[in-house]
Image (tube, rainbow, N blue to C red):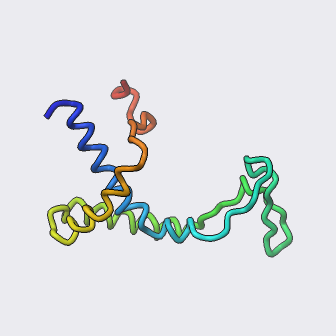
């Protein structure tokens, strides 16, 4: 397989993995709800008042607590594990096919050079 084909296959694979293993998880629950209105566009004009009356800038709010993060990461790890081990299962194949039409419409992926060690960066 040439490099262009490899990149095309990898792009298709990572999009469907992101859709099935990350997007359709508890992340959707965290994403649900009301989004505050900002007039500045950067949310510097949005604040949250907590139960102690503390006025906290939106840009400084943690939107996910440790327990939610742990549960989310465990769900993602389990889904990635299942995807890798069961990718040939007919039921999983049907799910992949059903969601592929949505996933392929996402932006093209690109290398995240922050993940690469200095020795392997191009």
Looking at the figure, which quarter contains the C terminus? top left
Looking at the figure, which quarter contains the N terminus? top left
| Relative side of 77 to 59, left or right | left
> Residue 67 location in percent, x, y?
53, 71
For the view shown, which residue lies furthest in the right direction?
53
| Relative side of 41 to 86, left or right | right
Closer to us: 49 or 67: 49
> Where on the picture, by quarter, is residue 31?
bottom right
> Residue 79 location in percent, x, y?
32, 65
> Where on the picture, by quarter, is residue 53?
bottom right
> Where on the picture, by quarter, is residue 56?
bottom right
> Residue 17 location in percent, x, y?
32, 56
For the view shown, which residue lies furthest in the bottom direction?
51
| Relative side of 40 to 63, left or right | right
> Residue 116 location in percent, x, y?
38, 35
Q: Residue at x 49, y 65 (%)?
A: 27
Where 14 sits versus 95, above or below? above
Q: Residue at x 56, y 68 (%)?
A: 30
Closer to us: 72 or 102: 102
Q: Residue at x 78, y 50 (%)?
A: 44
For the view shown, which residue lies furthest in the top direction?
122
Where 2 sits versus 22, above or below? above
Q: Count the labels in the image.
A: 0
Q: Residue at x 25, y 66 (%)?
A: 82
């Amino acid at each position: 397989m040439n490099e262009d084909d490899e990149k095309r296959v990898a792009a298709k694979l990572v999009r469907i993995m992101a859709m099935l293993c990350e997007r359709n998880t508890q992340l959707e629950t965290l994403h649900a709800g009301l989004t505050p209105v900002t007039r500045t566009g950067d949310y510097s004009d949005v604040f949250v008042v907590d139960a102690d009356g503390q006025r906290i800038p939106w840009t400084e709010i943690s939107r996910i607590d440790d327990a939610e993060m742990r549960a989310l990461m465990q769900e993602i790890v389990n889904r990635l594990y299942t995807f890798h081990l069961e990718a040939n299962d007919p039921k999983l194949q049907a799910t992949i096919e059903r969601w592929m039409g949505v996933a392929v419409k996402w932006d093209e992926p690109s290398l995240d050079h922050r993940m690469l060690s200095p020795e392997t960066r191009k």
